[in-house]
Image: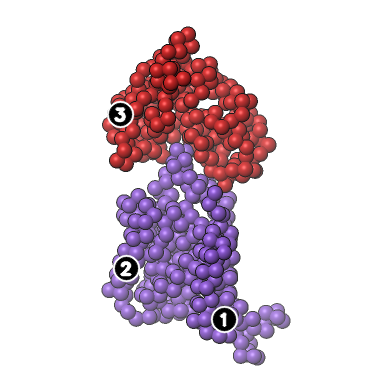
Amino acid sequence: MLELRDIHASYGQVKVLFGVSLSVAPGEILCLMGRNGAGKSTIMKTIMGQVPAAEGSISLDGKNLHTMPPHLIPKEGVGYIPQGRRLFSELTVAENIEIGLMTRNEGADTREWVLELFPRLRERLSQVAGTLSGGEQQMLATARALCLRPKVLLLDEPTEGLQPSMIELVRQVVVKMKSEGYAIILVEQRVDAVLSIADRVTFIENGKDRETVAASELQSDPTKLTKYLGV
Amino acid sequence: MLASLEGAVISAILVLTAMGLSIVFGVMRVVNVAHGEFFMLGAVLAWVVTTTLGGHPVFGFVAALIVVPVLVGCIAAGADRLILKRVNYDPDRTIVATIGMLYIIQQATLMTYGPEARPVEAPFNTRLSLPWFEFGDEGFQMIWPWGLSITSYKLFVIFAAIAVLIALWIVLTRTKIGLIMRATQQDSDTAQAFGVPVGKVYSWVFGLGAGLAALGAVLVVPIQQAHYLMGGDPLLLAFIVVIIGGLGSLPGTVIAALLIGMSDGIISVFFSPTLAKIIATFLVAMVLVFRPQGLLGRAPS
């Protein structure tokens, strides 16, 4: 479905990705793990076109994404939940959702579906997004991305700074999206959270994908975690 | 009364010009030094349109009011594509780029339009004496008892500016276009990740900002005359207003424009225009010392 082949990318003069290849299928959760600065978030940004790919190709269902203008990539069905949530913090909850709906011209039924998933947001529709609690902000960021009815969902550290009950909620939503057939790429630092939901784990080191293993394999034999993450 | 009405006219023009500057800065983070030249271009083009069309002043003026802001907006949007986009909207380089635009527009106008100041005839210019406001009866052509009067055109300017402001506010807060603009203002990267064509939005916003300045200029030419150097004062005043109001804060811009315009009008009538400018500049200094984020600006967190 979504496939990255030999992606090289840099921020200005500083090269960050040195040939990353990975792929994710519908109904699958692929987790990217690696130390800080390994290039995990950059991979996400390169998929979204925020960081241009200097070499290599990114394709979604056979369609090339890396040659598209960045604002057309989400319209192909790529929902992005950026690190740090990046809500439109001075807009209301309703307006943030509206932006998500506008991306692919989704209508009232999608809005209802998203608000069913996160009933808490319905209570706060007219509240300014920046005044929500951290967990509610994460819900809103997730809701905004789901408003696209995406084929692929990119989650960049969704549990960062959240209390355990919120982490559990995020986990449930991710698992639910997987069962509905979404392809999911997840960047996550917390090993326990990853191993319980991911299908496959790709280790990223120094801007390259080192190894991709099944999550079940890691559970029985955690030596690779020690090798790549030092935990 | 007369002084405050004169002040209101100045405020009306100023609020449109400053609003353009404020929107451009708010959404694009571009300090548009060429803003005053778009104002001048609006005035000069208003003269061109009215003289080429000829006929009744009302006809020419209405045509100018519609055509000129759109035309100036298109020129600005073109300049955005051609110049600002190429320097990646880098804050420092856009300042230098817009200074360049300032001179290009100014000198191009000098070469084509010439150094003369030319008037545009007001579409209607009935003299209204002031007691009319107090008695509320039909007061056209009334003899003005205390040597105080305002023209109907100046009143029209005030109401036109209010109408434009309300329309702008509705567009910004109630429409999808406004929502897209506000989202881009807050986080252009994320807006792009949700399908907002940020480049196009920037061109539209730059065009809108210049169009607002041009609209203010079309309204002012029947009072002030069009001249190729007339862009300097509005630019300075617009900057003063935007700084006092808080960069990027639209309500702050309106309040500051009222404050500066009214004080400029009142002080100019009773004392001297120079003193008015001194006080406005002094106000900026005070605001910068005691409230650097402006009256309604938010402190960076």
Residue A228: tell me if it is visible: yes
Position of residue A32 relative to residue B195, above or below, is above
Give the CA separation, mark 2 to mark 1: 32 Å
Residue A18 marker: 3
Q: Which residue is mark 2?
A: B103
Q: Which residue is mark 1?
A: B267
User: Which of the chains is purple?
Assistant: B
Residue A17 marker: none
Q: Would you say the residues marked 2 and 1 are in contact, meaning their CB atoms lie under 8 Å apart?
A: no
Position of residue B174 relative to residue A94, above or below, is below
Position of residue A22 relative to residue B207, above or below, is above
Chain of residue at mark 3:
A
Discs 1/3, front: 3
Give the CA separation, mark 2 to mark 3: 46 Å
Position of residue B171 relative to residue B108, above or below, is above
Q: Could you say where residue B214 lies in the image, as x and y percent from the top left? A: 44, 67
Which is more toward the observer, A147 or B253?
Answer: B253
Q: Amino acid at mark 2?
A: Tyr
Residue neighbourhood size for the residue with mark 3, other residues' Cα within 10 Å, grouped as few (<14), some (14–19), many (≥20):
some
Q: Residue at x 66, y 33 (%)?
A: A120
Discs 2/3, front: 3
Q: Residue at x 35, y 50 (%)?
A: B88
Q: Residue at x 38, y 68 (%)?
A: B37
As drawn, the residue found furthest toward the top would be A220
Q: Could you say where residue B208 lies in the image, as x and y percent from the top left? A: 45, 58
